[in-house]
Amino acid sequence: MGFWRRSGVRHFLIMSLQCGIVGLPNVGKSTIFNAVTASSVPAENYPFCTIDPHVGIVPLSDPRLYELEKIYKPQKVTPATVEFTDIAGLVKGASQGEGLGNQFLGQIKQVGAIIHVVRCFEDKNVAHVEGDIDPVRDAELIETELLLADIATIERRLEKIGKAVKSGDKTAQRKITVLEQLLKHLNAGHRTRTFKAEHDDLPFIRSLFLMSRKPILYVANVDEEEIQNEDRNKYVQALFDFAEKEGNLAIRLCGRLEQEIATLENTEKQIFLEEYNLSEPGLDKLIHAAFKLLELETFFTGGPVEVRAWTIKQGATAPEAAGEIHTDFQRGFIKAEVYSYNDLSRLGSELAVRDAGMVRQEGREYIVKDGDCIFFKFNV
């Protein structure tokens, strides 16, 4: 029998929040990527500065980890992580190979969520690839390219599966029906994420890696003056309205300001934030919004060796959460001892939580909740 209170096994299978940062050239994508990853990807005033996708892994800021560190006094603390990929600027016609379109559209297929940076500031020194500032036009331009690329993907798949039908494959006909319905949906200008599919068809649709199925977080990139105002300017408001209509999220931040904040020490950072009347770095808001976008939650394991935050999908069962630590834990799952972070923080120690009778024994059907502290029991 095995027990798990802290991470001490190598070869973890960790769910990473993977987001691709996209947008037109010269909207501030690389600047925001530099800030969020504290990296040095060049940000230049010309298209296609970012040729190869740059990847940065960033810790997810979570105040609960600091409290758990005080309680357990572990040798180390490991936060959940967010992976960002800076994908070069897309242009009109990318789905037909314009610019470096095919290469970059392929990179978008690999991420779980899209961070779409949209320029919402005027600056005569920074050229706009479309000639003027129009956030909704820019957002629709990118979404249209993703949609056209998905239509091409479905058409190719239909041609391939059509050959399987002729060979007598019985499952192929259902796939053709789904593809034809989905193609009609996309040709009408609708995104894959609004397509109403039968539950049994979802695995097949997921296997297509369609880009218009991915959730989008719109980032209104503004200047230093705009970020200090409580009211949104006309560009920002238009983008927020568009995001709401599309069923997506939107936030506002100043990429240039965030890049400067990222280079400061904690004490300097706080002074800087107060000077600009900001309650927190915009990048923290960005990371947490992306976390929400993918419907992810966090559970914790704790002990004297390590306190660790683990990422799971909302609705994950206890065995699935155990599998995030190691596949053996899911395969040999017996039960989980669970208590909430709030109870632990309030009572001050795990022993106090146990003495108060707040530790529950949960089985295979238990749905893990955000903030659960879990002690897994397994047998392999």
Image (cartoon, helix red, strand yellow):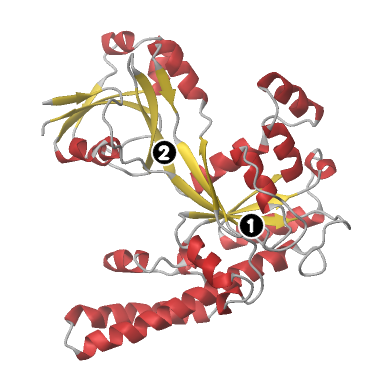
Using the image, tell me which numbered label, if any, was put on residue 299: none
Which of the image's four quarters has the N terminus?
A: top left
* Residue type, mark 2 in image: Glu
Q: Quadrant of the C terminus?
A: top left
Disc 1: which residue: 50
Tell me, yes or no, if residue 185 can be seen here.
no
Residue type, numbered disc 1: Thr
Q: Counting other residues with Cα less than 10 Å from the Cα at mark 2, is it few (<14), some (14-19), or many (20 or more)? A: many
Check if mark 2's residue and mark 1's residue have beta carbons within 8 Å: no
Residue 297 circle label: 2
Which residue reaches farthest right?
A: 124
Place residue 5 in its image quadrant: top left
- Along the line of sight, the residue nearer the viewer: 226 or 82: 82
Q: Is 1 positioned to the left or the right of 175 in the image?
A: left
Q: Residue at x 74, y 32 (%)?
A: 278
Residue 7 image offset from top left, x and y in percent: 30, 26
- Asked whether 343 or 105 is in front, the reply is 105
Point 77% across, 70% down: residue: 130
Depicted 68 relative to depicted 22: above or below: above
